[in-house]
Image (cartoon, coloured by chain):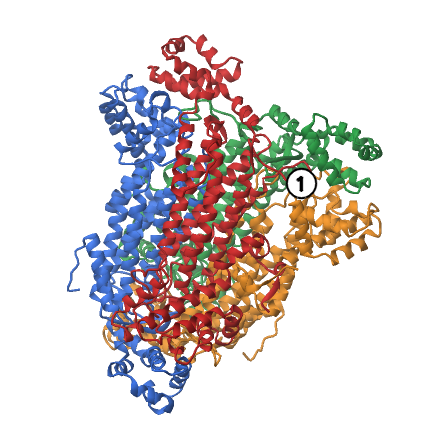
Chain colours: A green, B blue, C red, D orange
C-alpha cells in the first residue's frame, strides 16, 4: 500500500520538517525513494544509448527504454524486489518486462549493480546541489548580505568570552557569516563537481565489459558522459569513498556555520542583550503558559537539527572502510544521506525566513555599548602608551581599570590625575586622544571591510542587493 | 487527512525499513507522530483526572476529555499549530474546543509544555520498551539460545586476530551472544523503568502549581502515578537529561552487540570459511551479474544500520547541555529518538529471521579445524612442559612449531625426536598425552558452560526451548 | 631514555593539564604506563598466590613474586618487549628472570595475555574510581551544595530559551547541579563495581586451566577474589565489552553535567548578565591587550575539554565489536581510556577551585529580575484567570502583555482598566492578588526544594556543610 | 627543566607510540609544547621585522628579538604563566624581559593573543605537513606502488560481501590503495596550503592596528608574508574555522584509507585465506600461550588507532561554533590537534614497515582462486548468453550454478548437456569460449590498469620504483 497518513511516519523529516507542500515537491525530486529509482533508471538508459550509438543495441532500444522508465513506478520495482530480494535485479527485470526481446539483453549489459547505484547517487547529489542546496544557501547568504550592508555602520560592542571587548559594527558581525557561508557554498560546489561515476563492473577490473570492448575505460567514459559525469582513477565494485566523503564533509561543515550563526543570534536575543529580535506574528504563542515570551525558536531549531545531523559524519568515515572489492555494510547507511541534505536545506530555508524578518534594536545596541564604554578604551590606551614608550603599559592600564571600577572617575580623568601617565597623554596626537575620549570611534575598519566583503560575494554570485541598505 | 505515497518519503525508515505491514502497525503505536500526540493527550487527561479527584475540576471533565482525545487527530493539531506556532498550545486549544466551558480551564492547568512533552515521551518509551523492544530482543535471544544448545558439542576452531587459536564449540561461540544480549536486555529494562515524568512547571520550581496546592510535589506525584511514572529529584523546565541518556545508551550499546554478532556471522560465511550460511530462497538473486553468489546481506544490513545509528549518541550527549532553566536546542534533535528505536527493532527482527534459517556446515567446521590441528596443541604442550618443570617451555614450543611448519612431522613425532623434550613427555599422564594427540578434545568446558548459560537465560526469561537441541 | 623534558611531550595532558605536582602524583598511580605494568604484575601475583594455596606452586613462590614485582621497572619490561614484540610475554619474562627455577613455571600458569590485561584494567579503573574519581566529584558536589544552601532564598529570574521566564532562586539553580552530579556519582560508583575480571584462557573456554583443574571456573573465581573482583558470565579471549562500556558512559555523561554547569556559569558571567563572577587574582591578566576583561576561562576550559573527550564514546562503541574470539583492534584504542579519566578529574578539580571562589552579584540579580517584573506575572495571571473561569485566559493575557509593552501601564493597571478582566480580579484571594503585585514572591517552592536536595546528598555522602549557608 | 620518567606519562602517544628516538625528535619539532612556544615566538618576531622595516621599531629590535627567542625556554614561559594566568601575556613578558627598553613596546604591538596563537598553529601545521605528513604518506604510497607493480599479474579472486566474485590481480587490489592514498596526499597538500594567518586584532576589525596604520590589511598581509602565510577574508578574534576544519578532515579521511588497507590485509592474513603474511622476526612472540600464532598486530594497531582518532572530527565540528567574536571553548580542545597528526604519522610509519616486509603467498592465492573457479565464469557466461540473444540469461545461469553445486559437472559440461544453451555456446567466438573455459583469464584489464595507476603516481611524486617489480 503505497499511500500512508504522513503522521504515521516515524521520521520527523517525513511528518514534520519536510511537510511544506511546495518545498516538499522540490525535495522529493532528488531525495525520495522515487528519486532513487528514477535516477537509477536514467543510468540504465545512458548505457543503452551508448550501446545503440556503438551499434550493439538496436537503434529502437533507446526509445523503448525511455518509454519503459517513463511508465515505471517505485511500487512496481518494490513488488519485484520482494521476489528477487535484490533491488537492482528488480529494477532490471521491471525495465526488461516493458521492452522488446531485442532490446532486453542490453538492459544492464555488462554492468554490476553498483555501476548503477553509485553512478545514480553521484548524479542525483550533483543535481540536488545545483538545484536545491546551492540556491537555498545563496538565498540565505543574500539575506545576510542585505542586513550586513544595511548595518555596516551600526555600532555594536564586540564580545569575546561573552565579555565586552572592543567595538565592531553589527554589519561586521553579519559579514562574518556572509564570508564563511560564501566560502562554504563555493566548497560545496567544487566537491559536488568532483563526485564521480563508475562503469567498471563487479570488482572494478572491467571484467565483463572487456569481453565486448577493446577499450572498456573509454566505454565507461562514454556512458558517464551521457550523464555529465566522469570516472575516478580506480574503483572496486564501488566508487572510491573519498569524493562522497569530501562532499558530505562540505555539507556538514556548512551546517556548522548555520548553527554558529543561529547560536549567535539566539544569544543576541537574550532578554538582557536583546540587540536583535524576530518579528512576531500577531497570533503567535511564545509559551504555553508564559504569554509574554518571545522565544528564538527558529534559531534553536537550527542548532538542534545540527546536533542531530552533524554526528552523521562518523557514519561517513566508517563507510570509507569496505572489505576487499567491497562488503555491503555501507548500503543501508548510505541510504540516509538524503536525510542530511534535507535537514541542511530545511535549516537554510528556516534561517532565510527568520533573517528576512530580523528586527535590529538600536536602542539596546547603544545601551549595551555604553555599559563598558570607559573600559573599552583600555586597549587603545595601553597600545598608545606602549607606542609612546611607556615601559610597562599593559600593567599600568590594568591597574587603571581596577581603579576605574572602584571610583566613578573616567579613564581620561584617571590619566589626568596619574602623573606618570599624564606626560604620555600629552604626546598623543589629537586623533589619538579623540579615540580614547570617543570609544564609539574605535571600530577599526569594520565598516569598510563589511562593504568589501558584501560586494565581493554580490559580484561572485550576482546578487540583487538594495544598495541603500 | 494528509496521505502521501510512501516512496515520496525521504527517510529509508519510512519508505523501506518499516514497510512490512504487520510490523509497521506495531511501531506506529509508539513511534510515529500520531503516537506523540496520543501520548501527550494522555498526559493532559491524567492531569484532569487528578483535578477531578481533588474536586477542583468538575467530575464530568474526565469523560469529556476522554471523548475529546478519542476523536482528536494529528492533522487537527497540526492545523492549529500552523496558527499558534506552538505545538502544545495547539494541542490544548484542540482539546479545549471539544469540551464544555466548565472543563476548559482545567486542560493544561498549571502545566508548562514540557510537563506534557517530557512526561509523554518517558511514558511512550517505557511502553515501547515493554511492548516492542524487549519482546523483539528476547525473541532474538531465544533463537540464538536454541542454536547454542543444539551446537554445544559441535567443535569449531577458536579464532583470535583472525588466526586459528585453540578450539571451542560452535554452541560456545553462540553462547557469547546469548549472554551479552541477555545482559543488555536486562539493562534496557532497568533503564526504561528509571525514565521519569515531571509536573513542576515552567522553570521546575512549581511556581504555578503552588498557587493552588499546598503540596505541589504531592500533586505532581499523583498526576504521574496516573500514568505509572515517578518524578525525578529536580527538574527545570525539562526533566534532568540523565535517565533518558542512560536509556539511549542501553539501546545503542545493545545495537553494538547485534552488530558484533552480524560481523562475526558474515565473516564465518566467507567463501573460504563457510561454517555457516543462510538458507536461500529458490527465487532469490545473490548478485545482479554473478548468479552464483550467496551474499550475507542481512548481516551486512544490520552492521550498516548500526553504523548509521550508533553515532547518534553524540546528539544525546550534546542534549545533556541546556542553558539555565532550559534552552530549546534539544527539541528537534530529540524528535529523532523514535528512529533509533525503529532501527534497533528492525535489526533485531532481521537477525531473528536470518538466525532461524541459519545453516551450520559441519564439513567446513571440521575442515577448518583440521587445518592447524597440529599447531593447536602447542598451547597445552607448552603449559604441560612448564608444569613438569621445563625451564623455558614457551621458547621450546615456539621453536618446535617453526620446525613443524618446515617438516612434515607432527608435534608428537618432533617431541619424540627431541631429546630434551622426550623425558618431560614421558612424565605426562595418559590423559595429558591424549590431549596432545587428540586436539579435538582440547575444548575445555565449552559445552558445559554453553548449557549453563542457555539454561540460566531460559529460566530468567521463561523460554520454550527444544531441549533435544 | 626514560626521562624526557615534559614540554617535549605531545599530549596536553602530559605537558599542560596534569602538570600540577601533587595532583599528578595521584593520577600517575592509576593512569600512567607505570600503573599499567604495576597492576598487571599484581594479577600475576594473585595467580601465584592461589597456586600456592592449592599446593601447586611452592609456598615460597609468593614471596619471590612479591619481591620480583617490587623491583620491576617499566623500562625493563619495555626493553624486553623490544625483543619479544609482545608486551605480556615481556612482563612474564621479566618476572621469571627474577624468581627461582622452581617458581618460574607458575608465572602466567595457564593464563592468556588478556586474562592479565583485562583483569588489571578492571582493577585499576575500580581503584581510580574509589580513590580519585569519586572523591574529586564529591568535593565538587560539596562546593556546589554549599553555594546552593547559602543562596536558597536569593531570587533569580528563571530563563528559558535565554528569555526571562518566571523566578527561581539562585540556590535552586545550583541545586539542579547538586542533584544531577549526585545521581551521576552514584551511577559511576555502581558501574565501577560491575567491572569484572577474567581467567578463562585464550578463547574463554578454560582450555588450558581445565587440564589441571577439575573446577576451572572455581579456580578463576579464586584468583579474581584475591583482587576483589568477580568473573563475568561468558568471556572469549577478552571480557565482554559491556561492563566497561557502561562504566565509560557513566564518565562521559558525568562530564556532560560538568560541561552543562560550566556553560550556564559562563553565560551568567556575561557582561550584560553578570550575576556571578570569579574572584580574580590581583596579578591575573584577562586579555593580552584588553586589561579590563574578566574572562570565564575556567568554565570555558571545562566546556572545551568536554568537547575534546565526549566524542571518545564512539571509540568505546566501536570497540564493542571484536571478531570471533577477539581481534586485537581494541588494544591501542583502549590504551587511551586513562586519558578520559584524567580529563574528567582535571575538569572536576578546576570547577571545584573556581566554584569555591564564586562571587554572587546580588545587585545584578536584582536588576535582571526587575527588568521584566511586570511580564513575569503573566503566567500566574493567566492561570488564575483560567481557574476563575475565564474562557480564554491565555489569549487575554497575551494581548495584555502586548499592550503593556506598548504603554507604560503595569499589568495591574491594565487589568483594572479592562472591564472583562476586572471582575475576575476581584474574585482572586488576597494572597493571589499579592502574587500578581509582588512577582518576587512567585518562586514556588524553590527554597524548600533546594534545602531538601542539599540535605539529602549531605546525608548520603556525609558532607560537612556550613549550615548557616 | 622539568624532566619526567616517560612511563609516568598518561598518554600512550607520550609513553608508547612516539617513543622511537629518531621519529620522536622529528615529531617534537612541530607537535610538542616546545614547538607551540617556538612557533608563537616566530610570529612575534615576524611582527617586529615588519615594524622595523616600516621604521616604527628600531632597526636593532629584530636582532634583539631573534636573540631573545633563541634563548627562550618553554619552562620560563610556563613559570611566567603561573603568575599571569595568561599564556600569551607570559610569552610577551618573557620576550620583553630579554630585550632593550626601546624594543620592548614593539613586542606584540597592536596584536591580540589569537593573532599569535592561530597564526602560529597554521604555520606549524603547514610545516608539519610539508616535513612530516606528506613525506611519511608518500613513503607508504611508494611501498604500496612497488608491491602493486610487482604483483600486477598475480591472479587473486576478487571478493564482494566476503564471497568469491570474479578475479582481479593482487597488484590491482594494491592499486586501489595507491590511488586512494595518492588522491588524499594531494588533498592534504592543498588543504594545508589553504591554512591562513591573521593579524586583525581583538575582534577582527583591526581596531588597534588602524590607530597606527592607514592600511591595516596591508600591514597584516606583510606580517603574514614574513611567515609565508596569507590572511583570510574575515576574522573575528580568531580565524574562521573552516580552513582548519577542512585540513583536519583531510587527515581523518586519510586515516580511514590507512584503516581500510589495514582491515583488508588483516583479513587476507586469516588462517583460511593466508594470501599475505608478515615476515616474522625469529625472536618474535605471536601469543603469550600459543607460540604458533602469527598475528597481524600491526594492521590491528592501525585499525585501532583509527578508531581512537577518527571520532575527533566531532570535536572539530563542535569548534566551528564560537559565540560572537569568539568564546574560548575551542582553546583546550584544539590543543589536542597535534595528537591526531602524531597518530596518523605513527600509523603511516607502521604500515610502511609492515608493507615493506609483506610476504605474498602464491600457493594460497592459487588455491583460493581454484575453490570457485567453476562458479566464477557464471558472470561472463550470463553476459555472453544475453549478448547472443538469450531471453532470460541471468535466470538460466542461476539455475545452472545451482545444478553445478549439486553435481560434479563443470559449467561447460552442463552447458553442453543443456539443449537450450548449447546453441548459444556455439555462437560464441573462440576467445569467448576460452574465457569460460579458463577463468583465470577473466581479469579484465586489471594488469594494465594497475600499471597505469602506479606510473601516474610515480611521475607525480617522482618516485624511484624498481620497475622489474
Quadrant placement of the C terminus of chain A: top right
Q: Secondary structure at mark 1?
A: loop
The residue that label 1 is drawn on is D204
How busy is the neighbourhood of tag 1: few (under 14 within 10 Å), some, or many (20 plus)? many
Q: Does the rendering let one see residue A151? A: yes
Quadrant for residue A13, please give it.
top left
- Left or right position of B347 against A46: left
Q: Is residue D415 above or below residue A175?
A: below
Residue A136: % across, % down: 51, 39
Percent from the top left, x then y, of residue C80?
Answer: 50, 74
- Give the camera-side residue of D85 and D384: D85
Residue C210 image-quadrant placement: bottom left
Tell me if I can see residue A222 in this picture: no
Is D80 left, or right, of B341 in this rendering? right
Give the image location of residue D198, x and y in percent. Answer: 68, 47
Look at the image and tell me in which quarter the N terminus of chain A lies: top left
Of A207 and B352, which appears nearest the observer? B352
Name the quadrant containing residue A396: top right
Residue toward you, B95 or C408: C408
Could you tell me residue C467's position as x and y percent?
46, 33
Q: How many marks are shown on the rendered structure?
A: 1
- Label 1 marks which chain's residue? D
Question: D8 and C386: which one is in front?
Answer: D8
Amino acid at each position: 500500500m503505497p499511500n500512508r497518513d504522513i503522521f504515521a511516519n516515524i521520521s520527523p523529516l517525513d511528518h514534520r520538517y519536510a511537510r511544506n507542500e511546495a518545498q516538499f515537491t522540490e525535495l522529493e525530486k532528488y531525495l525520495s525513494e522515487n528519486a532513487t529509482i528514477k535516477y537509477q533508471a536514467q543510468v540504465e538508459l545512458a548505457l543503452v544509448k551508448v550501446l545503440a550509438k556503438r551499434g550493439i543495441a538496436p537503434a529502437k532500444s533507446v526509445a523503448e527504454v525511455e518509454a519503459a522508465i517513463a511508465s515505471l513506478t517505485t511500487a512496481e520495482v518494490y513488488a519485484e524486489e520482494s521476489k528477487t530480494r535484490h533491488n537492482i535485479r528488480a529494477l532490471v527485470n521491471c525495465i526488461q518486462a516493458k521492452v522488446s526481446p531485442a532490446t532486453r539483453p542490453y538492459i544492464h549489459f555488462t554492468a554490476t549493480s553498483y555501476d548503477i547505484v553509485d553512478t545514480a547517487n553521484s548524479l542525483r547529489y550533483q543535481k540536488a546541489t545545483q538545484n536545491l542546496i546551492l540556491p537555498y544557501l545563496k538565498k540565505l547568504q543574500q539575506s545576510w548580505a542585505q542586513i550586513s550592508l544595511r548595518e555596516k555602520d551600526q555600532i555594536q560592542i564586540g564580545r569575546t568570552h561573552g565579555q565586552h571587548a572592543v567595538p565592531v559594527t553589527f554589519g561586521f558581525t553579519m559579514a562574518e557569516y556572509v564570508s564563511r557561508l560564501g566560502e562554504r557554498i563555493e566548497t560545496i560546489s567544487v566537491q559536488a563537481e568532483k563526485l564521480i561515476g563508475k562503469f567498471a563492473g563487479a570488482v572494478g577490473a572491467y571484467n565483463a565489459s572487456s569481453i565486448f570492448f577493446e577499450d572498456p575505460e573509454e566505454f565507461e567514459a562514454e556512458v558517464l558522459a551521457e550523464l555529465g559525469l566522469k570516472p575516478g582513477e580506480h574503483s572496486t565494485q564501488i566508487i572510491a569513498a573519498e569524493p562522497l566523503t569530501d562532499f558530505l564533509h562540505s555539507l556538514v561543515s556548512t551546517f556548522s556555520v548555520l548553527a554558529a550563526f543561529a547560536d549567535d543570534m539566539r544569544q543576541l536575543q537574550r532578554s538582557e542583550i536583546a540587540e536583535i529580535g524576530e518579528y512576531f506574528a500577531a497570533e503567535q504563542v511564545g509559551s504555553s503558559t508564559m504569554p509574554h515570551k518571545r522565544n528564538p525558536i527558529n534559531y534553536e531549531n537550527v542548532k538542534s537539527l545540527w546536533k542531530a545531523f552533524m554526528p552523521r559524519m562518523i557514519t561517513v568515515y566508517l563507510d570509507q572502510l569496505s572489505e576487499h572489492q567491497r562488503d555491503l555494510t555501507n548500503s543501508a547507511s548510505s541510504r540516509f544521506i538524503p536525510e542530511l541534505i534535507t535537514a541542511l536545506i530545511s535549516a537554510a530555508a528556516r534561517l532565510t525566513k527568520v533573517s528576512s524578518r530580523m528586527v535590529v534594536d538600536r536602542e539596546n545596541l547603544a545601551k549595551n555599548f555604553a555599559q563598558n564604554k570607559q573600559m573599552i578604551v583600555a586597549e587603545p590606551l595601553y597600545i598608545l602608551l606602549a607606542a609612546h614608550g611607556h615601559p610597562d603599559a599593559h600593567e599600568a592600564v590594568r591597574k587603571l581599570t581596577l581603579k576605574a571600577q572602584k571610583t566613578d572617575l573616567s579613564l581620561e580623568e584617571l590619566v589626568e590625575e596619574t602623573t606618570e601617565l599624564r606626560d604620555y597623554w600629552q604626546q598623543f596626537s589629537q586623533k589619538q586622544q579623540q579615540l580614547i575620549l570617543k570609544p564609539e570611534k574605535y571600530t577599526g575598519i569594520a565598516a569598510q571591510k563589511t562593504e568589501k566583503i558584501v560586494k565581493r560575494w554580490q559580484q561572485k554570485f550576482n546578487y540583487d542587493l538594495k544598495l541603500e541598505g
